[in-house]
């Protein structure tokens, strides 16, 4: 039977061991003895009822269940750190620290500009940014370990308050030496028999890309899928295909050796700004929600959706 309460030191030991890779290194980083780290992990596995680590001499790896549990442990410790930082900020009367969970597409482009727009009296001395998958962003907001989140729809959980949803067009990215690099725009016909580079998640952007290609009867020569726009850009730069990516990342990245080309057809990329339902928002969170919109408005083709009717039709 899993205990209702776990020792925080057990979670700290797990995260340290996995992050550093050895018991010795984790013990040194935590200021514990190696025997204490070993005992904490053994007690943790006993308390939760399953093994979190494979042990093969000095080599350590997460089990399948351990991998899932590790994500929760990281999330909890991140939230605990935010609480500690918050207490110090309250004591010093400075703006409360803010925890932002966001998808990489926003972390790389829109978010830095939005933070820069904040008044220095609003921007706290402690800002914690976690760039992660949309699913993890939602879980962080629901768990209230993140003050604000930016994730990809659907965002229909009753525990979420969606402040607004942004839309921007996808673009094509090719190597400067690619045969399509001289085009002013790329049509569906241009993609025929080309290798495509695109998002791997079949339920979000990739689904819209597939729908458009099917509608125009585009038959690609192959596809390389991945989970990060930066990876798509690197693959395109090497001439491995035509990357179809959201334009939000490109707003914060100066990538040499590639050509960014508009699409003649529209593939929308959506993202939503969310907080936990019923959670009071600090002045910093309110200001960031506003500055995120101002930063996004600088994108070509940006559209803001805020009324419930338009949100349901996305």
Image (spheres, rainbow, N blue to C red):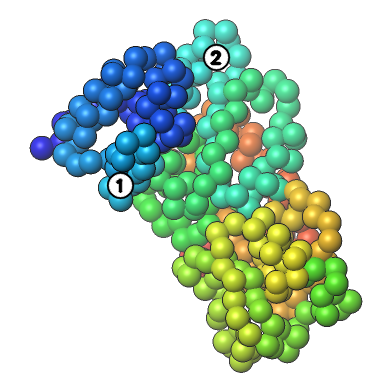
Please, what secondary structure does the residue beneath circle 2 have?
helix
The answer to which of 266 and 260 lies nearer the viewer is 260
Within the image, what quadrant is residue 112 found in?
top right
Q: Is residue 233 visible?
A: yes
Indicate the quadrant where residue 258 lies: bottom right
Q: Which residue is mark 2?
A: 89
Q: Residues within 10 Å of mark 2 (few under 14, many from 20)?
A: some
Q: Residue furthest bottom?
A: 217
Q: Is residue 186 left or right of residue 136?
A: right
Q: Nearer the viewer, mark 2 or mark 1?
A: 1
* Distance of label 2 from label 1 (alpha carbons): 38 Å
Q: Which mark is residue 211?
A: none
Q: Is residue 62 above or below residue 78?
A: below
Q: From the image, which quarter does the N terminus lie in? A: top left
| 147, above or below 30, in the image | below
Q: Which residue is mark 1?
A: 63
Residue drawn at x 51%, y 18% is 85
Q: Write down the quadrant of residue 127 in the picture.
A: top right
Q: Is residue 84 above or below residue 228?
A: above
Expressed as whole percent of the image width and height from the top left, the position of residue 121 reads 70, 20
Relative horizontal placement of residue 29, taking residue 180 as reference (left or right): left
- x%, y% of residue 172? 74, 70
Residue at 60% across, 50% down: 104
Q: Which of disc 1 and disc 2 is earlier in sequence?
A: 1
Foreground pick, 89 / 77 = 77
């Amino acid at each position: 039977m899993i205990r209702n309460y776990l020792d925080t030191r057990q979670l700290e030991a797990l995260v340290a061991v996995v992050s550093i890779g050895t018991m010795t290194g984790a013990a040194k980083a935590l200021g514990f003895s190696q025997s204490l780290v070993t005992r904490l992990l053994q007690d943790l596995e006993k308390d939760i009822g399953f093994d979190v680590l494979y042990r093969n001499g000095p080599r350590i790896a997460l089990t399948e269940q351990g991998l899932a549990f590790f994500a929760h442990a990281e999330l909890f410790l991140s939230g605990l750190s935010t609480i500690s930082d918050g207490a110090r900020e309250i004591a010093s009367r400075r703006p409360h620290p803010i925890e932002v969970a966001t998808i990489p597409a926003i972390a790389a482009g829109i978010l830095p500009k939005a933070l820069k727009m904040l008044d220095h009296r609003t921007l706290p001395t402690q800002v914690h940014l976690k760039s992660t998958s949309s699913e993890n962003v939602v879980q962080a907001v629901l768990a209230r370990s993140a003050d604000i989140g930016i994730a990809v729809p659907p965002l229909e959980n009753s525990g979420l308050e969606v402040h607004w949803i942004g839309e921007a067009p996808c673009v094509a990215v090719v190597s400067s030496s690619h045969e399509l690099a001289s085009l002013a725009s790329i049509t569906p016909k241009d993609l025929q028999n080309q290798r495509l580079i695109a998002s791997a998640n079949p339920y979000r952007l990739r689904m819209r890309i597939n729908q458009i290609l099917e509608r125009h009867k585009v038959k690609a020569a192959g596809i390389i899928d991945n989970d990060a726009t930066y990876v798509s850009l690197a693959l395109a730069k090497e001439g491995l295909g035509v990357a179809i990516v959201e334009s939000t990342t490109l707003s914060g990245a100066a990538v040499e050796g590639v050509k960014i080309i508009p699409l003649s057809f529209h593939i929308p990329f959506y993202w939503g700004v969310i907080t936990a339902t019923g959670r009071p928002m600090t002045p910093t969170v309110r200001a960031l929600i506003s500055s995120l919109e101002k930063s996004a408005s600088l994108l070509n083709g940006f559209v803001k959706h805020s009324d419930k009717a338009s949100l349901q039709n996305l």
